[in-house]
Image: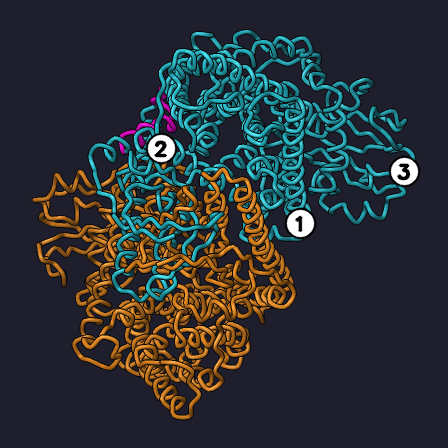
Chain colours: A orange, B cyan
Amino acid sequence: MGTAPTHSRGVRPPKALLLLPFLLTFVLVGSRGESHAMDNVATERMAEESHRQDSANLLIFIMLLTLTILTIWLFKHRRFRFLHETGLAMIYGLLVGVILRFGVHVPQSTSDLILSCAVNASPATLLVNVSGRFYEYTLKGEVSRSKSHQVQDDEMLRKVTFDPEVFFNILLPPIIFHAGYSLKRRHFFRNIGSILAYAFVGTVISCFVIGLIMYGFVSFMKVVGQLGGDFFFTDCLFFGAIVSATDPVTVLAIFNELKVDVDLYALLFGESVLNDAVAIVLSSSIVAYQPAGDNSHSFEAMALLKSFGIFLGVFSGSLALGVATGVMTALVTKFTKLRDFPLLETALFFLMSWSTFLLAEACGFTGVVAVLFCGITQAHYTYNNLSPDSQDRTKQLFELLNFLAENFIFSYMGLTLFSFQSHVFNPLFIIGAFMAVFLGRAANIYPLSFLLNLGRKNKIGSKFQHVMMFAGLRGAMTFALSIRDTATYARQMMFSTTLLIVFFTVWICGGGTMPMLSFMSIPVGVDSDQENSSAVLDGSQRRNTKHESAWPFRIWYTFDHNYLKPLLTHSGPPLTATLPSCCGPLARCLTSPQAYENEGRLHDDDSDFVLNDANVSCMYADVTVSTDASGSHTINRKRSSTASTGCGPTDEGLDQDLALAEHEVAIRGTRLVLPMDDPVELPTTVTLPPPPSPPHSDPRRHRL
Amino acid sequence: MGTAPTHSRGVRPPKALLLLPFLLTFVLVGSRGESHAMDNVATERMAEESHRQDSANLLIFIMLLTLTILTIWLFKHRRFRFLHETGLAMIYGLLVGVILRFGVHVPQSTSDLILSCAVNASPATLLVNVSGRFYEYTLKGEVSRSKSHQVQDDEMLRKVTFDPEVFFNILLPPIIFHAGYSLKRRHFFRNIGSILAYAFVGTVISCFVIGLIMYGFVSFMKVVGQLGGDFFFTDCLFFGAIVSATDPVTVLAIFNELKVDVDLYALLFGESVLNDAVAIVLSSSIVAYQPAGDNSHSFEAMALLKSFGIFLGVFSGSLALGVATGVMTALVTKFTKLRDFPLLETALFFLMSWSTFLLAEACGFTGVVAVLFCGITQAHYTYNNLSPDSQDRTKQLFELLNFLAENFIFSYMGLTLFSFQSHVFNPLFIIGAFMAVFLGRAANIYPLSFLLNLGRKNKIGSKFQHVMMFAGLRGAMTFALSIRDTATYARQMMFSTTLLIVFFTVWICGGGTMPMLSFMSIPVGVDSDQENSSAVLDGSQRRNTKHESAWPFRIWYTFDHNYLKPLLTHSGPPLTATLPSCCGPLARCLTSPQAYENEGRLHDDDSDFVLNDANVSCMYADVTVSTDASGSHTINRKRSSTASTGCGPTDEGLDQDLALAEHEVAIRGTRLVLPMDDPVELPTTVTLPPPPSPPHSDPRRHRL
């Protein structure tokens, strides 16, 4: 078969235009590297030119971000709250998109060639013999022939469109990690049951509701003749999966700023963080859902089960991996004195967190999900071991990465509306999608809230339900999932529609949150960390909070407090006290000297958990000594005696309460449960610690 | 011409294996993106597999870095100083290289094909028609036919070898920026003349000396028959350019830790930072040096001149760009109240600094050089405008990036010794190179020191000269420059030799610095910031320090102090005082309110410049009011009255001294020069500020 070098115009972007610093530079790498070994001066010059062009294009994005930052500042400075920074970034992106689309027209370079050859598969690497010289080519992907002559005729627009996998591999991980790392764990854990229900059950409900509604719409459109291509039931489900993930960014920034009720905040934040993970795994399971009869796209039980199995496997695998690397980091930071060198510590933390992503991807799990749970683990354990300096550094580092990635995604979203060249806007489909999204969200929130309220002591009020309904913004994850694959007609239509949904929810729902809150007369200005001290809490109310958690979580609390925290961090009771005596030597070896020191003043990061009237207890100094060594703890597989010397219901106290709920001896104040039979080393003096303070403000904490 | 799909083994790495977080993820992107639009399941699976393989490979590097960090900690903990962390990183890299080379053998995937076609040039993009479907391929580079069947047969080794441009576009910029940003400007500026001499004149001398010696050697080798390929005079010069750049990392870390004499430190650090910039521009000028008769590689005056012109143009262009973006950042941070939001401020700082790189690359200058001067400018001006929080954040961010990039480069260096598959070790050439490097360094240091000592009051002693000679390590820049192009025989030989030079200097010279210092009995333990307070300095000695700077720098000091600092930062005297009265309104508009406030307590970041007996002056409170409005300043192009109310020879005081050196009125203590004729607003009360303190510890500074 002969080669026919014909000129083709418009293929997929030859070079991903990458945005973040690192990314950017890589483009340069790519373009320069290509010209590397050729001593053809013309080619060299062309590559140089393309390199410059890439740099210039990237500058556009940097300028865009800089502008966004300045405007955000202006808004914050003037206290404009009707538009969040992400909405702002989108507007700027939109403007630049319009300019690029209608203002600039760079003609397509005509350097593309078409070769025909009799190869069966497309190899990853091609060696092309050009008049005696060999050039290496690497595979970029398939090009749909029909499209290549149609729309994508603008070099500039092609340049600013970049590989969607960038979102998954570069932009989302820091955002998701930051979400996990900055999670307010006290409120999160207090509402964990409800959060899990909304995130898992709710997202699946929403996915199926949206999928079914859309299938109805699509069928109707097919009848009416409005559909320009295939649209299978799996596509509908896929659409349901990608638009079910709510965004943890926009509303929550507003909620955080306004200091809305902490439980509402925890529910929304927890749900949106976890349902990102659920949506990503759900959508990939749906893609993997392949009924026996290939391409039939019909419903089949076995395939569904298999798909569900994939979902569970991938999710739990990613979770386990994320937790595992988090735990490893905790162990390393605990058993080395790395804390003397904050730079080393921060670097280690960063590398370990990043390796989670790699490890998950290498094992075939989902890196983004692993990174979320790694973030939570790091915050729960490793954070306690870090030096105060590193604590600040890591927080600030991930805050910055998160900020840059987030604003980039949102401005790119704006840009895409005009720069993406295969939009399919179908009014009927769009109307259907908006309805479906609305109904799906309703089917998630209202029935689940009803069911949850049956079990919850602290009911989720109807006002809260309305706010949760309203605040279900779609954001970065939805966008990333929908841009991942825009090869088919169905996917293109989905992408265009998703874009509109994101715009609508971010601008209208995001901007309307403030009026909504005041309309609902939901209290604003509650200090999330101090709320308990300002509110008048009597004993029974406090116990309510504890009882709210279901028993599995109470077991978990106790286990975490007695074994994991002491093992992985410098805080908690010494392992020598919690492990049975047969493990004595091991326990002594694993317990850090600080654990004994800290015993008296246990207020680690989990002062999150500290109910603030602990202070009051301390003032009263009502030290109640209770002897409880009867081994009657709910989870005691072995006869363990817990020794906890702490000031009142600190983290430790609270955990204790959860385990001893049935036979609580001391209602409030400091408790000292003395072991009667185990010959473990215990400090015999009860030292009254200073009142608990937030982790950051206590420089003595965990100092060696 | 027919296509002949034959299997080929061993081409250049199809995919750059990238290391830093961002990089890594990009690889994933690359590999996944490729499989994107194909619904060929087999190809999809292959891409998936390759993606996993890439992640796993990257994990190796992460683990390598993690290990390095832990060992560094151990070394620091145990106070081992004979091996610096970079040397350590190299050793680990070496070990992994050995394992990969001899332990693991992944057979080459046989998916590469060779197509022959009658194309004249090699296009950047290829569309290949594979049985009716179109696949896009992008150009990677030329492959030397002979090699492709020889050495590169190991998939694993290919995978860990990545595009050398990564060094220039991702790894070097943060390192160089950090060097500029963390420059100790007091000592740097005090020795600026000598530093510039060593960095510019010295590096050029060294380059030519090495080039000539190598040319002699190579000619000899040609006669003896030891040379396996072409080696032109320009190659020799290029070699001279790349091995002339000394490394600012290794020795200086040791010097900093040991607190060696500050002037010696400043000389070495300043030289090595600047000569990186010189070497990079010099080497690219030599590559651009193309005598009229193409490929003649002989000496020609015009081409040399042109090359020199390129050198000057690129260098000054990059410098100007770097300074320009730095100044812009300073202006933005000064005139907005961005400091209220440290996150925004840090993000802006980061983006602006990064845009320097892009801008320079887009304009055809050298990004790395621009980034260096941007760093210096940011430190000199912008840093003063940042909120204390952002000051910490930016420092820590770039410290981390620098640390990661540096350790990555050094461990990659170690790896390369075994993983690079085209090494050419020529014993004769290596011996020659070591001699040449030694002699080139000697030809830089000794004659220049002799000449400089003629002009310097504070002589550079012969011991210092020996240390500078000895401490001329070659590091990251040399490596990056030499790996950039390894296409020809000459370049391969250079690369292999350079690698050995780097190993030798880092391990032997780096490790030998301590013994060297004690052998030379050079005092250790001098606190660079406190040295003046510990040393007994009388007035005349202090004035020596000032006079050391040549007049151009004195002019610069005054200009900077009177106009630039007030314009770009919140510190310095108000512009209303320094600008002529006709510019009054403009000056008032440009002067920040803080300038008036700060007038009384001027100790900004340039407390670097603060000679510490200022404290003593403050104690004595000997306020000397001197009336000096005679317009007799050395540089006064216009009649300017300077008003400076400060405690003793602060930055301002010192600058003042430099300008008023001839007619200094007050020898020590606080000076208040009152303007006699200009109707500018001046605070009329002389407030005695608290003693100057380091910038970080003063939270009041620049607070709004």
Where's residue A467, x and y in %? 44, 78
Q: Tell me, for residue B332, which label it has, or none.
A: 1
Mark closest to the chain's N terminus, 1 or 2: 1
**Lateral position of residue B95 relative to residue B392, left or right:** left
The image quadrant of residue B654 is: top right
- Label 1 Cα neighbours within 10 Å, binned few <14 / some 14-19 / many ≥20: some
Q: Are marks 2 and 3 on the same chain?
A: yes
Mark closest to the chain's N terminus, 2 or 3: 2
Q: Tell me, for residue B411, which label it has, or none.
A: 2
- Amino acid at circle 1: Val
Front tag of 1 and 3: 1
CA gap, disc 2 to disc 3? 62 Å
- Amino acid at circle 3: Asp
**Lateral position of residue B582 relative to residue A142, left or right:** right
Q: Is residue B581 above or below residue B233?
A: below
Q: Give the structural element (helix, strand or loop) at label 3.
A: loop
Mark closest to the chain's N terminus, 1 or 3: 1
Circle 1/circle 3 CB separation < 8 Å = no
- Amino acid at circle 2: Ser
CA gap, disc 1 to disc 3? 30 Å
